[in-house]
Image (tube, rainbow, N blue to C red):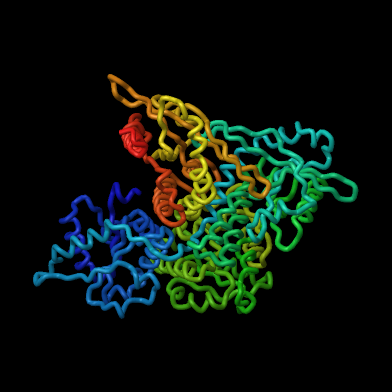
Amino acid sequence: MPCKQNPQVFISYSAKDLELVREIQRGLQRKQPELKVFVAADSIYGGQPTIDSIVEGIHRSSKCLLLVTKNSLKSSWFAFETTLSLEWSEQLGTFCSVMLLYGVTREELPKFQLFDIMPKVPLRLDSNDKWVDDQICKVIEAIQKETPINHALPVGNVAHAQAWSHFFGYHNVVHGLLEERIRTSDWYKENPNNFPIKIYEMVSKSCDSTSFTSDRRIKKVGGLDPIVVTRAGNKTRPYILNVYRLEDGGHKYYCVAQYPNVISAILKMEQSSDIQMKQYEKEMQLARFNYTLSAILHHNVNKTCHRQARLLQFDGQEPSEVLLNAIKTDIREGESIALKQALPAPLKSQQADLETDGEGDDKTYDAVIVCGEGDEGKAYEIEDFLIRQKLRIKPLLIGRSILRDLGDATDQCRWIILIMTKSCLNESTFSLLTMSLLTNSISEKNLNIIPIVDDLTTGRIPTQLQWITYIDMRSKGYKERICKALKGEDIPLALETAHIPAGNLGYGLAWGYIVNYMQTVLSKFGPHLQKVVKGEERSCPEKLYVLMPKSCKCTGLISETWPYVKHFSSFATLTEDLGGANIIKSLDIYYIIDDDNIRPQKHYFIGQYPAPVLCLWEMNESRIASITDRTMEREAERFLHTFECLMKGNVGNKLHTKCEIVHFDDSKQEDLRRKLVPILRRDNKRMLESRGHM
């Protein structure tokens, strides 16, 4: 975890208590000089987006110190920072916050569930208003201690990460050879007019893969020739595309179809007793997944993908009926399916069916437009257009009126249209608006915002809103797209210029990596390893070493980059059949030669790169993802921390001893050897001791 290497503490406080904060800062750094302390007054400079800086400060810190005073309990910024730290704690399953109480009793604390069990330390000053030494030590001890939250983990947002992971880990790999594999198959040669050059992904609202494979009209007839690649340190990883046949009216139709295996993570989370996932939350995750993956596949950069891929959602219908209709449509219309038919409805319109209290139909207005001072002209132009389209638009919220009237507007309107420009993001009022919208989305799990951007680069859009696909005012027909969104129609995005938001990636990638990969591989590879090393004069720990380079560049084999590492054997091929997709997971043994000049030794290990981190690197290299070097680094850190926390908890199912992430600086040629060899020596020694050989 990065915070262990560079410990940092974020102090949340009221500006009226700054002198007290200075004393806390001095006390902490007096006792632990290497400790970095994030204080907003020192750490946020002119021109930086305040919200983004606070979020990053919290996520980069090992702990948040919540200085609770009479002043801070009245501070909206303190409430915002507290909300973020609580959400971050819940996502990781361990407390990331410690309360310092000064002049406040426990009875005066806000009634948050986690406040009751969060670590608390009363703050005491001596007669000279200096922080007493013994208490400083207690706080430092609380900062260093990992305190698990012993109740069910929350859902968080895993959908975006699963969509990006599925695109780079599957679609981006297979589409280059899909057409060749289909055209050279016997099924296509015998029936070319009834075999579309497409992959159909069957997505059930229940996330249950068996609803596709159990349909008797969908008959598996075989698989195309494998597409074999080297990926994330795994040599010769095969991708097998299954072919299915459907019969109708005396005709035979063939297709490549499957259930997207990555969303099995959503189903596993719902079924887990350790996670708080309700039915509507699962369906919300699924809606997010469909919307994001469709936007990625149909981006202008991915022309091959959007000709060759279709997501087919079904709920209540027979999968064979949905699939057969899609095949006939594609045959009839050839390879030019319109983007409008391929993109699912916007996230909010899909979510409408999930509401249980019927509020969606009781709103007085369809939307309210919110903008900063100076942007009224743009707002009125949009308002006039929408009113002419017979939509009910509440009068504008501008500048200082936003905070006063936002609560009523949220209750009365189905949508909030948020106009974001360079000037408004520098306004404190607009920053507080973003804070309020974020807090509402956390507590209500109901995000109904349409961001409209102008004269902004993607990096300037507030972090909390970047997972929503936004509409650019500089693109042609943007007002029509706003109108379609409000009416619940498909949004024909300007995909030649759009950057698809990344969202909270690290957290979701860690979840998917554990439940879709680690839980299968770590529990099954032992017998395969024994067959390889049995009778050989070598030892290999029964453990997977995941090598995580600082640059996130996890391409190719490990031995291709590091001359002192050699590939020895691909030894385990583990197959899962999830909804018609043959998921083949392979493992590889490498050896690393130590730097002993007299008697260099070979140390064998099961190694690979983390595929989720490779996904981050590929996103950064692509032209479609809203991600920068800085974002990639932050999300890689978030992935690492989340993965380690979850693996040590109930989600890891006691498998954490069979896996270790080795984080190294790949800009230094010897750093991998320097980090990995001592770990392998330690684990080999433990293995020999357990066998009684020492």
- Residue 484 lies in what quarter of the image? bottom right
In the visual, does 507 lie left or right of 383?
left
- Residue 601 lies in what quarter of the image? top left
Residue lying at 59% horizontally and 40% vertically, measured from the top left? 584
In the visual, does 584 lie left or right of 608?
right
Judged from this view, the residue extending furthest toward the front is: 692
Residue 502 position (above or below residue 383): above
In the visual, does 207 lie left or right of 615?
right
Residue 251 position (above or below residue 603): below
Q: Nearer the viewer, residue 48 or 257?
A: 257
Image coordinates for residue 12, horizontal then vertical, percent: 30, 65
Residue lying at 49% horizontally and 30% vertically, measured from the top left? 532
- Residue 685 lies in what quarter of the image? top left
Image coordinates for residue 561, horizontal then vertical, percent: 43, 28
User: Can residue 630 be spotted in the picture?
Assistant: no
User: Can residue 97 be spotted in the picture?
Assistant: yes
Judged from this view, the residue extending furthest toward the left is: 127
Q: Nearer the viewer, residue 687 or 361?
A: 687
Residue 116 position (above or below residue 245): below
Image coordinates for residue 613, horizontal then vertical, percent: 46, 43
Judged from this view, the residue extending furthest toward the top is: 598
Image coordinates for residue 32, horizontal then vertical, percent: 19, 53
